[in-house]
Image: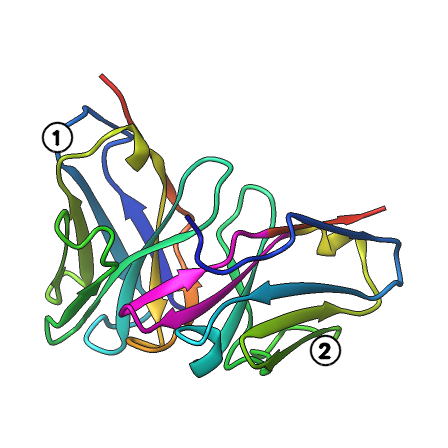
């Protein structure tokens, strides 16, 4: 069972801004960075955000991450059809393990 | 460009041992950490564990007693063995370069993944 909680789905129209939440606890998000991954259908996950709010080289600035307390969020602005994918948050947990969110499917209407 | 490629049997019988290899090119495994991550069909990702080139390992507590990760620096490969498998271990298994080690789920390069089914 995933330790971090995400909404199962989020949808928006092209150009819109959508946000995905990731809820945890003091033993994970509350004391550690959050990472976000994008998984296009049938492919391996791709790193989108590291250390809660930083983007790797090559990731468009339409993607942004933030963290507050025991929750984090990923925002996608100027939504595009190619953003249709599953998105996962991840963090370190004090149980000495990396933990993932349940995943959110983004649909572009 | 770092490339990772998983290989191994696509079908394993219940109670047997799942064995996978990850071959790395474009970079040496004698640097960084290297992780295994899996994803059951239609479900979320699950971290299995990592190995550092020194041989130091760390595992997900939920799998610790069944998983073993090892590395062969001469072949630039690392491997996963998961014993006493059941149908719940059916998943796509990914290997990935791990920039975070402990305290950070930070994977920048991933293999394409390999589906392993557990069935008699």
- Mark 2 residue crowding within 10 angstroms, few (<14) / some (14–19) / many (20+): few
Frontmost of labels 2 and 1 is 1
Rendered position, B89 above or below B75: above
Residue B35 vs residue B60, the one in the foreground: B60
Residue stretch in magenta:
A86-103
Q: Chain of mark 2?
A: A
| Residue B110 appears in the picture as rendered | yes
Judge whether residue B105 can be spotted in this image: no
Give the image location of residue B52, x and y in percent.
19, 73
Q: Which residue is mark 1?
A: B16
Magenta stretch: helix, strand or loop mostly: strand
**Above or below for B86 versus B119:** below
- From the top left corner, tell me how far across and down residue B6 is, in percent: 30, 48
Q: Is residue B63 above or below residue B105?
A: above
Residue B80's tag is none
Q: Quadrant of residue A58?
A: bottom right
Chain under numbered label 1: B
What residue appears at the point 86 percent right and 46 percent down from the top-left corner?
A109
Question: Is residue B57 or residue A44 the one in the foreground?
Answer: B57
- Dividing the image into 4 quarters, which one contains the C terminus of chain B? top left
**Colour approach in the figure:** rainbow
Do discs 2 and 1 belong to a common subunit?
A: no
| CA gap, disc 2 and disc 1 | 47 Å
Residue at x-position 89% and y-position 63%: A15
Which residue in the protein does label 2 denote? Answer: A61
Reply yes or no: does residue B49 show up in magenta: no
Q: Which residue is rendered at x = 75% and y = 73% of the image?
A: A62
């Amino acid at each position: 069972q995933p330790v971090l909680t995400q909404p199962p789905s989020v949808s928006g129209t092209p150009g819109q801004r959508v946000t995905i939440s990731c809820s945890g606890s003091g033993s994970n998000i509350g004391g550690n960075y959050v990472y976000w991954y994008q998984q296009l259908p049938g492919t391996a996950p791709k790193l989108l955000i590291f250390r809660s709010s930083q983007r790797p080289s090559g990731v468009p600035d339409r993607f942004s991450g933030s963290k507050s307390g025991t929750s984090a969020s990923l925002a996608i602005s100027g939504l595009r059809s190619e953003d249709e994918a599953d998105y996962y948050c991840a963090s370190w947990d004090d149980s000495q393990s990396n933990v993932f969110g349940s995943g959110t499917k983004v649909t572009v209407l | 460009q770092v490339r990772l490629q998983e290989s191994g049997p696509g079908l394993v019988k219940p109670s047997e041992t799942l064995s996978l290899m990850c071959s790395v090119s474009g970079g040496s495994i004698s640097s960084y950490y290297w992780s295994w991550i899996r994803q059951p069909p239609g479900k979320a990702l699950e971290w299995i564990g990592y190995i550092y080139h020194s041989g130091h390992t760390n595992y997900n507590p939920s799998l610790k007693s069944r998983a073993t990760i090892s590395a062969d620096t001469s072949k630039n490969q690392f491997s996963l063995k998961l014993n006493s498998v059941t149908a719940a271990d059916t998943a796509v298994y990914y290997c990935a370069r791990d920039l975070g080690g402990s305290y950070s789920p930070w994977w920048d390069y991933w293999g394409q993944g390999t589906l392993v089914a557990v069935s008699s």
